[in-house]
Image: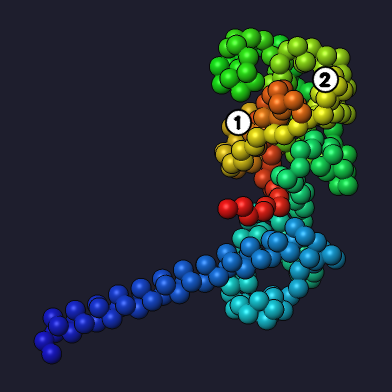
């Protein structure tokens, strides 16, 4: 075989080896991500009640994974701030996410009642002209004054969400003297209107925190937060509460019960 052919043949074998190596790395990364998803579910549902994960070898056996895959999965969870490696102890749970249901219309304090005390820091509150998109959602003329409220909400003193709320002023005026620091707006709305809340339209997406939101939530600038947009109606169908809620994604998990309907 001519030298030039041998060189090309060797180069071809090298390319095949590199491609195979990259494929193995991709496969291991995929497996690590899959394992991290399974372990994350365990973490969030108290699957490790003593707060310590099994040894890497035990996890490898239980999940039929290699030790390297287990280490990569734990690295992913460590990067999320859910676990930490402690010398002489092992991998321990260091953060807890609180469950927020999406299948019932409840205020935050009602939702997290069994997990601790929710308090509200009212940062801004007062009448403001409704931007056109807000007015359209609340079915009021554009520019009509609404009550605008910005609240930092804490669970057990830890920042959890930043809530921006718009309420028609004929209802919102009665909120000006209410105890918003310790009471959900939902309860106050039902008291003021004499009606039960009926339903809400929600949208949930991940957005990057702006400088203001990150500072208030004590989160790194640019970190991803869960944005819940919710338009709540009274039982008679009137929209009365438009909210934009930014949740710290490392402290909340959203869940719901869905039924298939064709």
53 or 235: nearer the eye?
235
Q: Which mark is residue 151?
A: none
For the residue pair 199 and 152, the one nearer the viewer reads as 199
Q: Secondary structure at mark 1?
A: helix
| Distance between the alpha carbons at the discs numbered 1 and 2 | 36 Å
View extreme (bottom): residue: 1
Mark 1 vs 2, N-terminal side: 2
Question: Split into 4 quadrants, where in the image is the N terminus?
Answer: bottom left
Q: Is residue 38 above or below residue 208?
A: below
Instruction: Locate residue 173, reporting x and y percent.
Output: 79, 12
Name the residue at 67% across, 29% down: 231
Q: Which residue: 80% across, 35% down?
A: 107
* Secondary element type, mark 2: helix
* Corner quadrant of residue 17: bottom left
* Pick the front one: 148 or 15: 148
Along the viewing direction, whichever of 215 and 176 lies nearer the viewer: 176
Q: Which mark is residue 193?
A: 2
Which quadrant of the figure has residue 142? top right
Please tell me whether residue 88 is drawn above or below residue 188 in the rendered image.
below
- Residue 211's disc is 1
**Mark in front: 1 vs 2:** 2
In the image, residue 121 lies at what x, y percent? 80, 27
Can I make out residue 86 in this image? Answer: no
- Residue 59 shown left or right of residue 194 in the figure: left
| Residue at the farthest left position | 2
Count of labels shown? Answer: 2
Place of residue 19 in the rendered image (x, y in percent of width and height, measured from the top left): 35, 73
Give coordinates of residue 176: x percent, y percent: 82, 14
């Amino acid at each position: 075989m001519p030298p030039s052919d041998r060189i090309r043949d060797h180069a071809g074998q090298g390319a095949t080896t590199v491609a195979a190596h990259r494929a193995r790395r991709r496969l291991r990364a995929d497996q690590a991500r899959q394992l991290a998803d399974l372990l994350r579910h365990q973490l969030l549902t108290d699957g490790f009640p003593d707060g310590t994960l099994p040894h890497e070898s035990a996890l490898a056996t239980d999940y039929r994974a290699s030790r390297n895959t287990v280490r990569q999965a734990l690295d992913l969870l460590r990067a999320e701030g859910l676990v930490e490696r402690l010398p002489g102890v092992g991998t321990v749970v260091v953060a807890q996410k609180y469950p927020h249901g999406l299948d019932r219309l409840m205020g935050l304090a009602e939702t997290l009642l069994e997990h601790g005390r929710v308090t509200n820091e009212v940062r801004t509150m007062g009448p403001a002209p409704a931007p056109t998109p807000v007015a359209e959602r609340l079915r009021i003329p554009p520019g009509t004054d609404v009550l605008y409220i910005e609240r930092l909400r804490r669970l057990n003193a830890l920042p959890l969400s930043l809530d921006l709320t718009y309420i028609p002023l004929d209802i919102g005026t009665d909120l000006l003297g209410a105890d918003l620091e310790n009471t959900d707006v939902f309860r106050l709305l039902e008291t003021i209107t004499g009606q039960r809340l009926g339903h809400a339209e929600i949208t949930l997406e991940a957005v990057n925190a702006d400088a203001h939101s990150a500072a208030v939530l004590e989160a790194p600038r640019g970190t991803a937060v869960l944005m819940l947009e919710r338009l709540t109606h009274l039982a008679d169908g009137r929209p009365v509460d438009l909210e934009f809620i930014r949740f710290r994604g490392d402290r909340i998990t959203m869940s719901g019960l869905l039924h298939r309907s064709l």
